[in-house]
Amino acid sequence: MKSRFVFPRHTKADMPVAVAGDGPYLIDAEGKRYLDASGGAAVSCLGHSDLDIRAAIQDQLDTLAFAHSGFFTCEPAEALAEKLVSLAPDGIERTYFVSGGSEAMEAAIKLARQYFLEIDQPERRNIIARWQSYHGNTIGALSAGGNRWRRSQFAPFMVEAMHHVSPCRAYRDKLPNESDTAYADRLAAELEDKIVELGPDTVAAFLAEPVVGATMGAVPPVEGYFQKIKAVCDKYDILLVADEVMCGMGRTGTLFACEQDGIAPDMIAIAKGLGAGYQPIGALMVSGRIYDAVAAGSGFFQHGHTYNGHAMATAAGLAVLEKISHPHMLAGVREKGRYLTDRLAKQFSDHAHIGDIRGRGLFIGLELVADRETKTPFPPGTRLAARIKANAMALGLMCYPMSGTIDGESGDHILLAPPFIVENTEIDLIVDRLAAAIENSLI
Ligand code: PMP
């Protein structure tokens, strides 16, 4: 079909037209069913036909669709903020609703700056993030992100105040014989060196994804990493911002991914799983300390978008949160995540081109390598991940591909993030179809 919506790379590939959803499946106009093993891009945590979420959106539409946040707050936004705060790590007291992940991270960057202006530390103007990270595609969030390929074309627009340190990526960067503790110490020392180099009084915030998603394929930190990073941030009074846009909202088996690292960040950005694909919504959750400083100072956050706190989006978010925060649901994510990981390990542990299988909960990445011994990635031009995606779609499977970076510093990946409602029989099907798609792509 000739599309007037998507750009050429996609139209060439003859993109199917999605017309319906059925549990973990999407159905195209020809009636073909696709098992959604990636939740789109870690979005559809409740599948594609949840009647409770549909009813919540319909009820909200019947009463109030939208009231501009410059004039009103609204009931679903208040209820969702209240519930999120009640479930959040210590210190988080307020929630600011936006329409997606990039907006949440833009808000985090601007609020970090404004916080320090409010407390009379105007020299705090630098932000530190990590290479191989993704924080969104708007200019501020893209500048904070550390994916060289995504940044390269827009280099003239990259914000100078953004700086980068190494990611925590044990598979590629932990030295032979280096313990997890020594590796985490080394990375924390690198952050401290960067802070000292920039001038400790000039740094406002450190941003990181607790489990790295879009650029590396579900890479969790080594044990203790975030506690050491948090200690460095605290030492210099730097805000720690957790970007949980992809890994949050139950995806890793706890509602917030950072719970498993035993840290309480100053801000947490969430999105994808919060709306579960039923509505576009994101949020920036902030500590009482930050909120109070703004409230006592200028009295308002100098930021805003038209759809802040949209009534239907927040009504959907509330209905989603009620389901995904249930202890049975989160236990199910951990249990099914173990099942998926075991099945992948059985299928691929001897595979010549699967270098690493990692992740947490139902957030699993496979790294593809040309050579397992040397961990050499396939050359970027091979576009192996994209070929696997196309072959998987032909077999009725959605998996999320990521191509290796232009400079070869990481290989191609496949990200799996199926809906939390997935059954073990469907997990079996995911692994079988993925194995076939990989074989078809290596030919
Ligand atoms: N942060 C992270 C960690 C993400 O994975 C993404 C989306 N992949 C974003 C921010 C940006 O979110 P959005 O696409 O909703 O703007």
Image: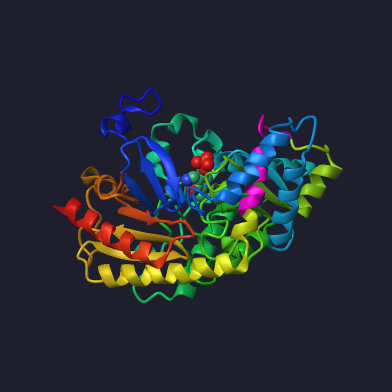
Quadrant in which residue 66 is drawn: top right
Residue 429 located left or right of residue 118? left
Residue 190 located left or right of residue 62? left
Quadrant in which residue 364 is drawn: bottom left
- Residue 272: x %, y % from top left: 54, 47
The residue positioned 82% from the left and 49% from the top of the image is 292
Q: Is residue 395 visible?
A: yes
The residue positioned 34% from the left and 54% from the top of the image is 414
- Residue 347: x %, y % from top left: 26, 69
Total labels: the figure holds 0
Work out whether 368 lies above or below 5.
Answer: below
Q: Residue furthest right?
A: 296
Toward the viewer: 324 or 244?
A: 324
Residue 228 located left or right of residue 120? left
Work out whether 420 lies above or below 382.
Answer: below
Work out whether 196 lies above or below 382.
Answer: below
In the rendered image, residue 315 lying in the magenta stretch gets the answer yes
The residue positioned 28% from the left and 64% from the top of the image is 355
- Residue 300: x %, y % from top left: 79, 37
Q: Is residue 145 visible?
A: no
- Residue 1: x %, y % from top left: 30, 27
Q: How is the image coloured?
A: rainbow
In the rendered image, residue 75 lying in the magenta stretch gets the answer no
Magenta highlight range: 302-320
